[in-house]
Each structure stands twice: as C-alpha cells, then as structure tokens.
Amino acid sequence: MKEDSFEHVFEGKERVMVVMPHPDDLELYAGGTIARLIANGIEVIAVKMTNGGKGTMQTDVKEEELEEIRIREDTLAAQTLGIKPELHFRLNIPDGEVEADLQTIEKLALLVRRFRPNLILTTNPEDVIIRFAEDCNWVNHRDHRLTGQVTLDAAYPYSRDTAFFPHQLKEIDTPYEPTEEFLLADYWEHQDTVYIDITDFVDVKARAWRCHESEYSQERVDDSVDFLNKDGDKYFEAFRYVIAD
C-alpha cells in the first residue's frame, strides 16, 4: 500500500519551483501535487521551457498557430490549479530545441536566485527509456531529459556560486542559499520514489489537464489519470525525491 509523503517532503517549505518542458507536462506529472501545495499555502513558481508549438501530428497547423493555442490553454490550466499569473513563466524556447547550454542555464539560474525555492520539481534527466512497469515503457522526450539536466545545473552550481552570471546579483539583495531538495518526475520504480496523495485534488488536476484541448480529449485525460495515478480508491503522483549536498 502506498503511503503519503506530503508532510515528509514539504514540511517547512514556503516556495516550490516547478520547471517543465511543455505546457501540459505540469498537469500530467504534478497537477494534483501543485493543487495540494497551493491549498496548503505553499507558493508555487511554474516555469515552462517551450510553448509546445511542434507537439502535433497534424500537417495543416503552423507552429506559430499551435503555440498561440497552447499558450491560451496553458494560461487557463494554470488558473485552474491556482498558480498566480505573476509566478507563471515561459522561456519561449522553440519546441524540441531545449539545450543544455549556458544561455538556458542562465535564464533558470536567475529565476532560482530571484525566488529562492526550498524545493525544485522537474523531469527525469537520466533515462532515455522510461520504465513504468514490466510491460510498459516509453521514450523520454529529449526536451524532458534536457529540462531536468539544465534545471539541476541551474540550481547547482550556477545559482549558488557568485562568479557565475555576476550581473544577476545586482538585482539580488542577499546571497542565495542553494536549493538542496528535488522532486524528479517520470521515475516510477526508483529506490528513492515517494508518493504524494492527490485524492482530494484529482478532480482539480483533471480539470486543469483537460484545458489542453489541442493535445487531449476529456476521455484521454480521464483514462490517463486512472492509468498513472489510481491506486485502489486513492490517487497518487510519484516522484524521485533527492536531497543533495
């Protein structure tokens, strides 16, 4: 039986930063957890690396048109979860072009330094193939792998050490205490896996996820929530929980 680790992971936390590759990934991986955090008075800073303009198999939709659609959907989804507009950021990197370069790390390091999150939630930076179960695997999208990598890089050492991007420190009043705790999504059978009970927030997660109408039908959302999160009569989101020093 899965046990709820919400108090263990988030006790004493005031701010959590969530960095996701595409507009719908936040709802998919962590929508229930984010809704629960906000309900408990914990501030959530949401960062989207891309606007998802290439996330389609249609041939009659231009990238710019799809970006506009997905930004509108993403804005509505964030509002549904309760994320404050002033804490919702998009880096506007072209879909499929996330890179592990200093330019990207610099953008994330500025946000980390500015908001000083107590914990950062992002995607699996390691596995090319995700193993969900013995007979269920999928390819870990390149944007997902690299988002996890640059987010961890931004947290350490680039936002900690003052010689990196020193111009940023002109707008930072006090030295930054580095983030040492991370939740990594798309780990399902890792020894560090923890489960967050989202039973009371699964409806909010589903409503927010359904806002991404260009990507998901209502039926697909409901099926996916049950497939990924349902455990008996409860719902959980799974993460790898890492305390680094």
Image (cartoon, grey):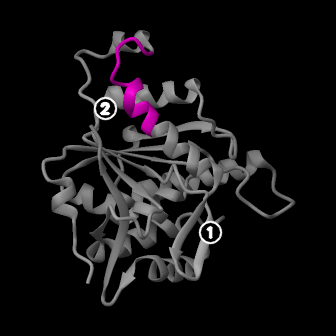
Disc 1 versus disc 2: nearer the observer: 1
In the displayed structure, does residue 18 sit left or right of residue 72?
left
In the image, what residue occupies the spot 61% across and 37% down? 92
- Give x and y (percent) for residue 145: 57, 49
**Along the viewing direction, whichever of 217 and 98 lies nearer the viewer:** 98
Residue that label 1 marks? 138
Q: Bounds of the magenta span? A: 152-164
Residue that label 2 marks? 115
72 in magenta:
no
Q: Residues within 10 Å of mark 2 (few under 14, many from 20)?
A: some
In the displayed structure, does residue 96 sit left or right of residue 119?
right
Identify the mark nearer the N-term, 1 or 2.
Answer: 2
In the image, what residue occupies the spot 68% across and 46% down? 95
For the C terminus, give its image quadrant. Answer: top left
Look at the image and tell me whether residue 71 can be seen. Answer: no
Q: Residues within 10 Å of mark 1 (few under 14, many from 20)?
A: few
Alpha carbons under labels 1 and 2: distance apart: 34 Å
Name the quadrant containing residue 205. bottom left
Secondary structure beneath label 2: helix
159 in magenta:
yes
